[in-house]
Image: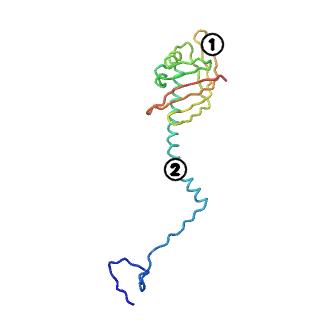
Amino acid sequence: MTYTHDDHAPLDNRAPGCKTPCKIKKEETMTINRRDLALSTFAISALALSTPALAASADEEAVAKQVEAFRLAQIAADPKALGALCWDELSYSHSSGKVEDKATFVTNATDRKSTFLSIEYKDPTIKVVGPAAIVRFHWIAEQEMAADGKKVPTNLHILMNWQKRGDDWKLLSRAATKL
């Protein structure tokens, strides 16, 4: 039996007498073990987390600079510098329980009824969470009272909350606890 070949017909290896080689490739099964899977998952996770980590460290550095500027402004009793470092909605809580808004805080911090001889922010920690930064430190200071020249030491634990709006980090709240 003879078959005629039509050049435009699709090839069919099942036809009797067809000598066209089969070009269908079988798909090979991919094998992957747990270690390979864990390593690839770890690599992808590390890449995904590296960019936010870099951004967070840049924000942490920016907050650290603002915290230091705030400390220096307190020592200098500089109303313009203190005002520029705080949001208008500031809530400033003292270890005595007294709470001040921004205007009251700046006025009282710069009234010269006492002068800071030193302020140390010891063992600071900064944790940036989105547009907020939680800052904690041990406050050790000494101030001199203007009325009688008496030197008064202070030993406090401070919690500050800094907020980022646009590119600016400013103090939103502060709380103190006596140690």
Residue farthest to the top? Answer: 147
Q: Nearer the viewer, residue 106 or 122?
A: 106
Residue farthest to the right? Answer: 179
Q: Nearer the viewer, residue 114 or 133?
A: 133
Amino acid type shown at disc 1: Lys
The x and y percentages for residue 86 are 49, 24
Residue at 56% across, 28% down: 160
Image height of 42 relative to 13, above or below? above
Residue farthest to the bottom? Answer: 1
Q: Nearer the viewer, residue 39 or 19?
A: 19
Q: Earlier in the sequence, mark 2 or mark 1?
A: 2
Amino acid type shown at disc 2: Leu
Res. 117 image quadrant: top right
Is disc 2 placed on a helix, strand or loop?
Answer: helix
Residue at 62% across, 32% down: 123
Image height of 99 relative to 45, above or below? above
Residue at 52% across, 30% down: 162
> Which quadrant of the rendered structure holds the N terminus?
bottom left
Q: Which residue is mark 1?
A: 150
Is disc 1 placed on a helix, strand or loop?
Answer: loop
- For disc 1, the neighbor class at 10 Å (few under 14, some 14 to 19, many from 20) is few
Res. 134 image quadrant: top right
Residue at 49% across, 17% down: 103
The x and y percentages for residue 110 are 51, 16
> Which quadrant of the rendered structure holds the C terminus?
top right
Check the image and tell me how it is coloured: rainbow
Q: CA distance from mark 2 to mark 1?
A: 57 Å
Q: Are marks 2 and 1 in contact (CB under 8 Å)?
A: no
Q: Which mark is residue 47?
A: 2
Q: Mark 2 against mark 1, which lies toward the viewer?
A: 2
